[in-house]
């Protein structure tokens, strides 16, 4: 293996180990030492790729969010679908460890000054990517542009709320919420002339 692919493989292992640790141990339990242990690399190797813990955490989140959006769009490219179906498929793509990692960093950014600006940057990019994905994959013809632009943010606000609930709720409580969201999305074609 040449130097470049080896470096990329090491970087990928570090990012994967970071996400696993965020999911299993949370923000406070995800130390650089823990990530090195999980990835099977030395601290020097980690520091070569990510000079600070914040760089590592933010890169892990940024990578997984951008990969998830790109993968979702690629998997559904050319298939404009009804919004209720898209919502259910999106939930299936995002639930679980990805949301847990995001939630850990989002909460930590509230009181961790070094995390605030990088998280804002990552989330601004994610918001732009999600809006572009919705515009590509969902038929919003006839809806006012300001309504169509809010749909993805409303969707992720609901998803985010469900993710917060995982910390204290039993699993399965999200199903009635998702069903209601799907029903509301199904009403949008009827409301096109009203909104």
Image: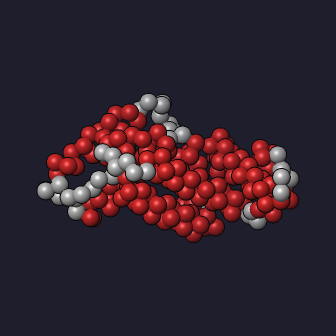
Q: At 17% across and 51% down in the image, what residue appears?
A: 191
Decide if residue 77 is on the left or right side of residue 42: left
**Residue 12 location, x and y as percent?**
71, 52
Q: In which quarter of the image is the C terminus?
A: bottom left
Decide if residue 107 is on the left or right side of residue 28: left
**Residue 30 location, x and y as percent?**
70, 49
Is residue 69 something one can see in this rendering?
Answer: yes
For residue 112, what is the image quadrant? bottom right
In the depicted view, which residue is nearer to us: 41 or 104? 41
Decide if residue 10 is on the left or right side of residue 78: right
Relative to 192, say whether 187 is above or below: above
Is residue 14 something one can see in this rendering?
Answer: no
- In this figure, what is the number of numbered marks? 0
For residue 180, what is the image quadrant? top left
In the depicted view, which residue is nearer to us: 189 or 76? 76
Q: At 59% across and 58% down in the image, what residue appears?
A: 62
Residue at far left of view? 193
Q: At 44% across and 30% down in the image, what residue appears?
A: 172
**Residue 83 location, x and y as percent?**
31, 46
Q: At 80% across and 54% down in the image, what residue appears?
A: 6
Decide if residue 47 is on the left or right side of residue 158: right
Relative to 25, say whether 60 is above or below: below
Coloring applied to the structure: secondary structure
**Residue 157 location, x and y as percent?**
40, 52
In the depicted view, which residue is nearer to us: 133 or 187? 133
């Amino acid at each position: 293996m040449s130097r470049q692919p080896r470096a990329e493989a090491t970087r990928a292992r570090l990012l994967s180990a970071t996400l696993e640790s965020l999911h299993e141990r949370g923000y406070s339990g995800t130390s650089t030492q823990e990530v090195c242990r999980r990835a099977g690399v030395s601290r020097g190797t980690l520091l070569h790729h990510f000079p600070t813990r914040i760089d590592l955490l933010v890169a892990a989140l940024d990578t997984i969010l951008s990969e998830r959006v790109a993968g979702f769009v690629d998997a559904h490219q050319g298939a404009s679908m009804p919004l209720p179906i898209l919502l259910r498929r999106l939930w299936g793509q995002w639930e679980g460890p990805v949301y847990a990692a995001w939630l850990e960093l989002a909460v930590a950014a509230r009181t961790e000054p070094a995390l605030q600006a990088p998280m804002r940057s990552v989330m601004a990019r994610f918001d732009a990517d999600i809006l572009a994905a919705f515009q590509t994959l969902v038929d919003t013809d006839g809806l006012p542009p300001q309504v169509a632009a809010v749909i993805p943010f409303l969707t992720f606000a609901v998803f985010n709320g469900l993710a917060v609930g995982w910390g204290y709720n039993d699993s399965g409580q999200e199903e009635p919420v998702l069903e209601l969201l799907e029903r509301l999305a199904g009403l949008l074609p009827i409301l096109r002339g009203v909104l």
